[in-house]
Amino acid sequence: MTKRHMSWRNDRGAGTVVSLGIVAAIVTVTTALTMGLGAVAALHTAQSVIDGSALVAADTASGRSPGYPCDRARDVAAAKSIVLGLCQINGHSARVSSTVIFLGISVVVKAQAGPPENR
């Protein structure tokens, strides 16, 4: 029997394995960042739509726009494919909220609009 001597010089193909590991790490990090940025973008979009819904509801409650405040708020949200959850009218003020689900994570977005409170 002959005894083989192990050395780093005989590691054929090791560079390929290391390169594949680096590529896999880069793909994993890029995918995670893309998903995270997508979640942030979806949250910001939902918040903007809910803010607009609250403003429309408050304008309608104050008489500046015709219609029913919560119906108008639901129409604004539905135009951007968001389902309005809560709509409360108190005088000329409106509070609205919705639950947004992105990648299985649900987040509640809320907005309030109306004239400033009397102090």
Image: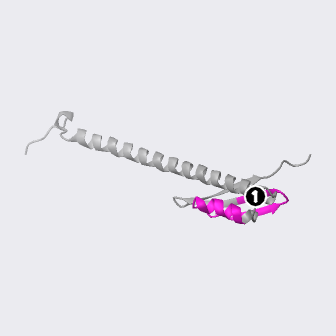
Q: Going by the image, does 96 lie left or right of 27?
A: right
For badge 1, the amino acid type reads Ser
Q: Residue at x 67, y 64 (%)?
A: 74
- Bounds of the magenta segment: 71-96
Q: Which residue is mark 1?
A: 65
Q: Going by the image, does 80 lie left or right of 3?
A: right
Asked which quadrant contains residue 29, the reply is: top left
Against 75, residue 48 (above or below) is above
x, y percent for residue 13 = 20, 41
Q: Residue at x 65, y 59 (%)?
A: 76
Q: Residue at x 67, y 55 (%)?
A: 50
Which residue is the extreme one toward the top? 9
x, y percent for residue 31 = 42, 48
Residues 89 and 36: in front is 89
x, y percent for residue 42 = 56, 52
Asked which quadrant contains residue 63, the reply is: bottom right
Q: Going by the image, does 27 lie left or right of 73?
A: left
Against 53, residue 20 (above or below) is above
